[in-house]
Image: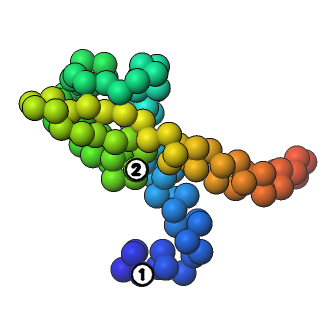
Amino acid sequence: MAEAKNQLFDSDLQELAQLFKALGHPARLQILKFLASKNACFTGDISDEVPLGRTTVNQHLAELRKAGLIQGTVQGVKTNYCINPSVVKHLEEMGKDFFDGLSIIECTDC
């Protein structure tokens, strides 16, 4: 039912909402910051970098992959994680356009 209601909105808003949803947990933000700080792909256990259990971290990684914000490739028993720069850049542009389009007015009666 919720999926059908999403169709009432234009595709840009739907896409932006999905990306914002993927960013809607501090663990996911920390994972992105960690990967960005490496300036390269990371092969290892990201759960060592986030104060959550491995299973929970893997669920957050799956959400970030589903949104396209990160890429993961399997190398043997390890997964190589990278930020997807084109999707992050697209998010940056869409977010800027969205927030630039909001009129911010001081409310003196609020």
Q: Residue at x 40, y 50 (%)?
A: 68
Above/below status of 13 relative to 48 = below
Left or right, residue 102 beside residue 17? right
Residue where numbered disc 2 is placed: 68
Q: Quadrant of residue 29?
A: top left
Percent coordinates x, y for residue 91 in the rendering: 57, 48
> Residue 94 falls in which quadrant of the image?
bottom right
Q: What secondary structure is found at the residue carrying circle 2? A: loop
Inter-mark Cα distance, 2 to 1: 22 Å
Kind of residue sitting beneath label 1: Ala
Please report the residue visible at 48 percent of the width from the left and 52 percent of the height from the top: 19
Q: Where is mark 1, residue-wise? A: 4
Residue 52 is labelled as: none
- Residue 80 in percent (x, y) is at 26, 31
- Image position of 52 (left or right of 71): left
Label 2 environment density (alpha carbons within 10 Å; few <14, some 14–19, many ≥20): some
The one of 47 and 26 positioned closer to us in this rendering: 47
